[in-house]
Amino acid sequence: MDVEMSCATAPPEEAVSVDWRGRPCLPRRHGGMRAAVFVLGIQAFEIMAIAAVGNNLITYVFGEMHFPLSQAANVVTDFVGTIFLLALLGGFLSDSYLGCFWTMLISGFVELSGFILLSLQAHLPQLKPPPCNMASTDGSCEKASGFKSTVFFLALYLVALGSGCLKPNMIAHGADQFDGATPGGARRLPTYFNSAYFSFCAGELVALTALVWVQTHSGMDVGFGVSAVAMAAGLVCLVSGAAFYRNKPPRGSIFTPILRVFVAAFTKRKQVCPSNSNAVNAGACEPARLAGNFRHNNKFRFLDKACIPVAPQGPNTKPEREWRLCTAAEVRQAKTLLAVTPIFACTIVFNTVLAQLQTFSVQQGSAMDTALPPGSGSFRIPPASLQAIPYAMLLALVPAYELLLVPLMKRLTGTRSGITPLQRIGVGLGTVAFSMVAAADIERRRRDAAAEGRQMSVLWIVPQFLVFGVSEMFTAVGLIEFFYKQACAGGMQAFLTALTYCSYAFGFYLSSVLVSLVNRVTARHGGGGWLGDNDLNKDRLDLFYWMLAALSVLNFCCYLLCARWYNAGADGSDAPASAGQVASEVDDGKEII
């Protein structure tokens, strides 16, 4: 059978950004930082609301709902993991059907209803088990179950559904306000991502100080109510900017074109180039190698056949159906999605470390002297507020990074963002192990002091939060920028941005699995396992931290290999890119590590 070696190269139609009435946007009236400020506002208010709940949730689940400590930790990690996993749903709905603005608005009201129900559940005594001391060993504490448990989890997962669908769209909608096709818009995009992280840090700082203080001194019901007020303020901020937004219309199901590529490639898996092809046709046997410098040309070559049309065998031959013939742009989109998967996978262990700082490190602080100054009783730090320390530091570091480090790195590397997203991710993954090393060392010292009847100051666990905060500044922002740039050509901005949050989800789920697995394995040698008791003085949290430090080092080594593979040039080699190639790829929205 003769095969015509020409690739279907019809480019996808470019979606024109529209205003809230569906009319084409005007450059001087819509978009830019003026519009992005409103998105930064809802981001700050939303993270303020959800962080106040999530970061102190283990105290409520353990102390008032009476779940055992290991189960309480798993409730928190499962809740946070579900939030981030549902980000995929939010990204899909936005890119495919609703658009960012309407997805954010609907999700925001769902999250608000969850906060209100959670506040009612915490306020009404009939929806909670009777108060008791969980530190007692007589087993008199009644664990929440039945209708009480149902109301609690319903409220909790309404919050998770709303927050999960909202998160990727806040980042994507803010970035959509800058036209990446223009030099000015592309230049301001890295600045926006740093501004978004600054907004995130500001919201976290308020949540972990003022809101956690309210929870500690006025009760969790009041604290949850304040979270509801913050969420309502965020929705007002979102709606206030509606007249200024650049909105990218949805394009229909984002999965259908990618699925068509795999179906077409499978149905044509046996198709080969004829041996008598001339030089021109032989070169066309590589249909996904399009003009330009597409990084992944020599990867996933099995997908290339999806866009090779079969030559007609007669005048009455019907054209191939769309599920048997794809455009080269669709093949490139599928290849890009596959290529970013290893980078995504390498960030999961990083977020497992984050899970410990929101669970066991809070309980670690509860077992220490929280008085300031140490030894006095004048003022006590809520243990959950310790997580505010790195965010307070980052409020200074993020502007310093943007104003000082980026210009310096621009001169040294010649790249627009100073350091590339993959380099930024690598710095974060390479330093996070030191957070767990610090945590393990301090936990060993704390246990030794407790055995002697002494309490260490809670300030000793500050270093593990500080080191992780710096690591997160590099990893989180680098990952968001990396995924958004990969999505620009395919109209999947919200969905690929959601992969960042999906990494958080898998990290928190992995934490739950590791806690249960470590308890099961270590309990075989007698006792309750490393994390089997409700008393940290009997547990071996320090050994668990050392295990995570080793996993982080191993994960960093894997990342280096994956990043090197990802950056293999268009010729398929791993040779370092030239300066001209770096400049070319940066202009195209691609990055060299």
Image (cartoon, rainbow, N blue to C red):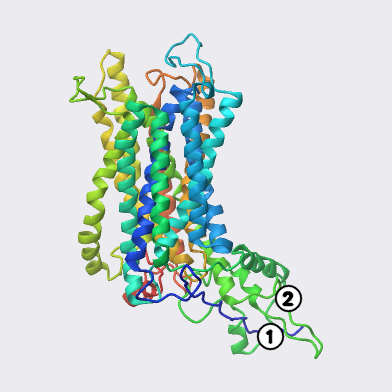
Q: Residue at x 80, y 91 (%)?
A: 315
In this view, 172 is above or below 434: below
Q: Residue 525: percent from the left, percent from the top?
A: 51, 19
Camera sees residue 531: no
Q: Residue 186: percent from the left, percent from the top?
A: 35, 71
Q: Residue 34: percent from the left, percent from the top?
A: 32, 65
Task: Please state which amino acid type lies under the numbered disc 1.
Answer: Glu
| Rendered image quadrant of residue 251 | bottom right
**Which residue position is annotated with label 1?**
4
N-terminal of the pair, mark 2 or mark 1, is 1
Determine the CA span between mark 2 and mark 1.
16 Å
Check residue 450 in the rendering and tell me which mark sits there, or answer none.
Answer: none
Q: Residue at x 48, y 60 (%)?
A: 101
**Which type of secondary structure does the marked residue at label 1 adopt?**
loop
Camera sees residue 411: yes
Task: Please state which amino acid type lies under the numbered disc 2.
Answer: Arg
| Rendered image quadrant of residue 221 | top left
Please count the marks in the image: 2
Check residue 321 in the rendering and tell me which mark sits there, or answer none.
Answer: 2
- Going by the image, does 402 lie left or right of 10? left
Q: Quadrant of the N terminus?
A: bottom right
Q: Residue 327: percent from the left, percent from the top?
A: 61, 76
Q: Residue at x 19, y 19 (%)?
A: 375
- Going by the image, does 177 lie left or right of 309? left
In this view, 341 is above or below 258: above
In this view, 513 is above or below 501: above
Characterize the local packing of mark 2: few (<14), some (14-19) or many (20 or more) Cα atoms within 10 angstroms: few
